[in-house]
Image (cartoon, rainbow, N blue to C red):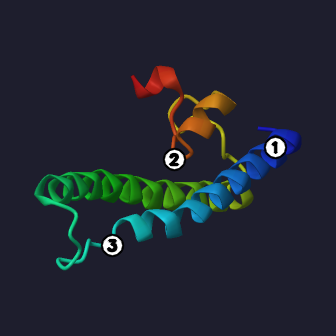
Amino acid sequence: MDTKEREDFTNVIKKELEALREQLPSLEKRMEPVSPDASIGRLSRLDNMVNQGVVEKQLSNTRVRILKLEEALRRVQEDEDFGLCAECGDPIPLKRLLAMPEAELCVECAS
């Protein structure tokens, strides 16, 4: 990965991190339980509990993605071999790194 690609990768990752961090408060707010005093009806309460389960998974995925992106940023800045397959030494396509910043293997070696 050349200097320009590293810079582009870093900028894309920073933008994605910013967007994900902006989503966190909204997701956390949607996780708040509905007060038992709220008269929303039994089915609405059950629907809300199901939705909270979906939001909980989304929140968890967002946090994991943030951690992976932060680690990728650290590696791109510190590791001169970042972007090269750990097994065969060929460059890992930028699209793969953007989709999976934790990738250390090219598609061929990963399969």
Q: Earlier in the sequence, mark 1 or mark 2?
A: 1
- Frontmost of labels 3 and 2 is 3
Amino acid marked by disc 2 = Glu
Residue name at image x 14 percent, y 52 percent: 43
Give percent across and percent down for residue 98. Answer: 62, 39
Give percent across and percent down for residue 22. Answer: 61, 63
Give percent across and percent down for residue 62. Answer: 46, 56
In the image, residue 64 above or below residue 36: above
Amino acid marked by disc 3 = Glu
Compare residues 99 and 110 and report the one nearer the observer.
Answer: 99
Amino acid marked by disc 1 = Asp
Q: Is residue 56 left or right of residue 80?
A: left
Residues at discs 3 and 2 in contact (Cβ within 8 Å): no
Is residue 73 visible to us here? no
Compare residues 3 and 21 and report the one nearer the observer.
Answer: 21
Q: Residue furthest left?
A: 42
Query: Which residue in the structure is indicated by mark 2?
Result: 102
* Label 3 Cα neighbours within 10 Å, binned few <14 / some 14-19 / many ≥20: few
Q: Is residue 21 left or right of residue 51?
A: right
Residue name at image x 48 percent, y 20 percent: 108
